[in-house]
Amino acid sequence: MPGSLPRVVTVPALLSSLPRGANPPSLPSFPSISLPRVVAMPTVAEAPRRLLQDCCSVLDHQASGGVCGCCWALRPRYKRLVDNIFPEDPEDGLVKANMEKLTFFALSAPEKLDRIAAYLSERLTRELNRHRYGYVCIALEAMEQLLLACHCQSINLLVESFLGTLRLLLEADRPHLHILATGSFVKFANIEEDTPSYHRSYDFFVSRFSEMCHSDHEDPDTRIKIRVSGIRGLQGVVRKTVDDELQVNIWEPRHMEQIVPALLVNLEQGNSDSPAEQTEVCFRELLGRAAYGHINNAIRPVLMHLDSRSLWEGGGFAVRCFQIIMFSIQSQHSHLVIQQLLGHLDANSRSPASVRAGIVEVLSEAAVIEATGSVGPTVLEVFNTLLRQLRQSVDYQLTGYYDNAGKHKTTSFHEKTLQDAVIKTIGSFANTLPVYQRSEVMLFIMGKIPVPGIYPALGSPNTGFEGSRMIQVMLLKSLLQVSERYDSSNLLTALPSSFLEPLLSFTLMDDPEIRLLVLSILTSLIDRRHNAARITAVSVTFDVSVLEQKEDRCSRQDNLFIRKHAQRLYRHVFLACKEESNGPSHYQALFILLVVLSVELVSEEVLVDLIRLILALQEMGVSNQESLSVWNRCSLHAVCAAALHVLSQTGPPPPLHQHVTQVIESRQKGAPHLLPESVLCDQPRIPNGDLKVDKDLLFVQSKVCEALTGSSYSTQCERLNTPYTPQLTDEDRLSRKMSIADTISLQIAIDQEASADPQKPQTEQITFETLKNAIEDSGGVEEEERRKRMEVVERFQTAPFEEIAALCGSRTSLLQSKLDRVFDLIVRPPPSPSGQPSQRSTPVYEMKFPDLCVY
């Protein structure tokens, strides 16, 4: 028929035209000749279109080994079932009825699954090469349904072809294919397999999904979709591999160094157009699945990413990042994160102050989140690292450079910011510890602080005395941070001798900031009911009802503390009030300490001792033996008035309160400069010239004793009649009035004088004439001693070190001989009544006492 289309003759059509029972003729085999794929013949116009499509399909899938493969009816059944799932138009989607037939066949004959998967992969590859993406989606959907249906032992037969297909799609240059492949992989990752697999590899998927997370596609919507797909793909890899020991170890550094930065890049862009929410979910899931041995591998890439992108400065993202980490990991692994941060802080000790401050801020926030009560087995190492950072920061601040080469400059502002961050972090760490560990931490910090007479040299040689002073201040501030959060019912535990004695020695320092810190530390440790926060100012109208007072008397432990340490505490408070450099904050801290002592240690003995101390301070302000300024003397009187006003309301009989009130009223009328409202204020009103105080404006010891008579305080009145006079000890000679070098120099000078005249007897009989001569010539002798002392001090300040060392070493034997002579005098036996010399007894220091000897 003219105008008709060429007819395509297929082999099945030829076979159907043969008579019934006739065998088809065999075709000759030619090794170098292949059959034409399509034979065009004239045909009628009404030839079914379906026949043309079937012919093309069969000839497309012909086998190379013969012509049986090109016969659609002779093809394997699994191939025919696979071909039937593809519709005529790809927009119609998967043929569901034929897909059900294919699924049933796969479940009935699971040994065919590998062939089905291979054939589906072959079809998908061919359609992909021809850019027929509709059929690509259909083939991938069919593989997904087979995976979901065949989740039994035979699923491994499908997985290799499936993963190979996904690799092919992810390597294409079409973003929608990347998204399609990622979705299929996520579905596969959610399938729980019953049998292990020994030969799978997910390295390609880790690399490709991580690369997708860094997509910079020009279209913003497409870029977000690709990044979200990459994040979901990484999440699928983690789910698929983390619980299977036979799979690839996703926690290896080479994988973590790809996954973690890919997540942090998207987490960093936390705006409405970024996949930050999906990223945080994936990041939390990754960390939540990390075991003990995997924490370090997961945290190290985080630190590297923050370093490379300079994200420590400002601290916002770094803090948020580690908040996610601390909340996501298992609580028993939290100390590993802390150790990683501490090690990173040490590694960045030569970095700018802003970087170090950012790391310290992250440490502080991590310590707050860490709520198990311990930061790991190396608790003291945490504080040792932080204190070492303080020392280095002081050196950098004074030298102006944060490296030894002197190339990188720093400023005092940045270093002070770092120091404040370190001190805050020390308090945060201490707050997570139990009470007994906080005591150890306070002792540890106290051991790092230079104590007068024990640690004369401190800091680096470049910083000198100012560096030593700054380190003392920083460490005391750190100690204050720990003590403010320390709650203990036992003062003997909170203030042991090994801690209290070196702490009190700082009250003798000349630096007013150090003395103020010591008073604050003492108050915070003694104030177990937090009354210090309720005392806002020094006032003679302070109402004691706002304080939380103890109803019972002192416990046994408190009584032991009073007997052991109270007098030493009163003595250092008295000596601290002698300093002319005291300011309003010092007198307020002194007032708070006296009030806290009266409330916490409820006993007649303590109250009487505090009254004696206050009267001694009043006498210091009247006599002015220490040459204090008028303002300091007025401040002393004001503090005494306010403290006695509070003490008179805490338990003594009413007559004492009446006497105190009468004196305060007299001062309000005639001498307001003796009250805190007029002195301890922004604009103090003090008299011109010397301060003169009338007796009517003073608290009288006899009247106080009379007011306490007839009450439970009567037994303490005898002690009240004895004025308080603190005894000076050897500790005062090691105070700020004489440095360590001066003390050593003075000792050597005395030794030189003693050795100048070897014939002079070592002991001298003390008589009345000796004392008289000493008094009469005291001025000349003191002047001569002062001159010699200054010569020795100048020698130690200017002489070379080798000369000083030789001079000190030459006195060793002389000192030893003197000590032997003193010991001989001590252990010399008493004279015998018979007049005969007694046998030399064994020296006391050489006696060996039994282990159970009671001293």
Image (spheres, helix red, strand yellow):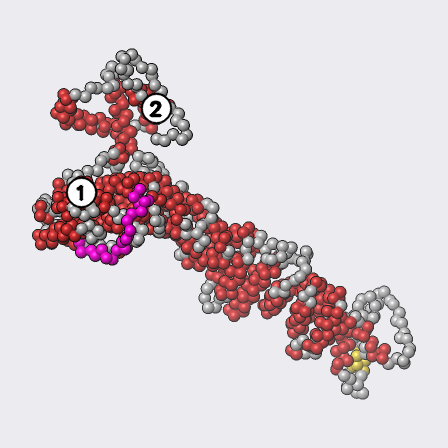
Which of disc 2 and disc 1 is earlier in sequence? 1
Residue extending farthest top: 836
Q: State the SS at label 1.
A: helix
Residue 658 horizontal/vertical position (percent)? 14, 52
State the extent of the magenta-drawn residues as a range. 540-561
The answer to whether any part of residue 158 appears in the image is: yes
Gap in Å between the C-alphas at discs 1 and 2? 42 Å
Q: Nearer the viewer, residue 717 or 617?
A: 717
Residue extending farthest bottom: 1
Vertical relation: 47 (above or below) 308: below
Please state which of the two labelled residues, at mark 1 or mark 2, is closer to the viewer: 1
Q: Amino acid at mark 1?
A: Cys
Residue 815 horizontal/vertical position (percent)? 31, 22
Q: Amino acid at mark 2?
A: Val
Quadrant of the snapshot with the C terminus: top left
Q: Which residue is mark 2?
A: 844
Q: Is residue 636 left or right of residue 469?
A: left
Residue 454 horizontal/vertical position (percent)? 33, 35
Quadrant of the snapshot with the N terminus: bottom right
Residue beneath the point at 52% across and 67% down: 224
Q: Which residue is mark 1?
A: 717
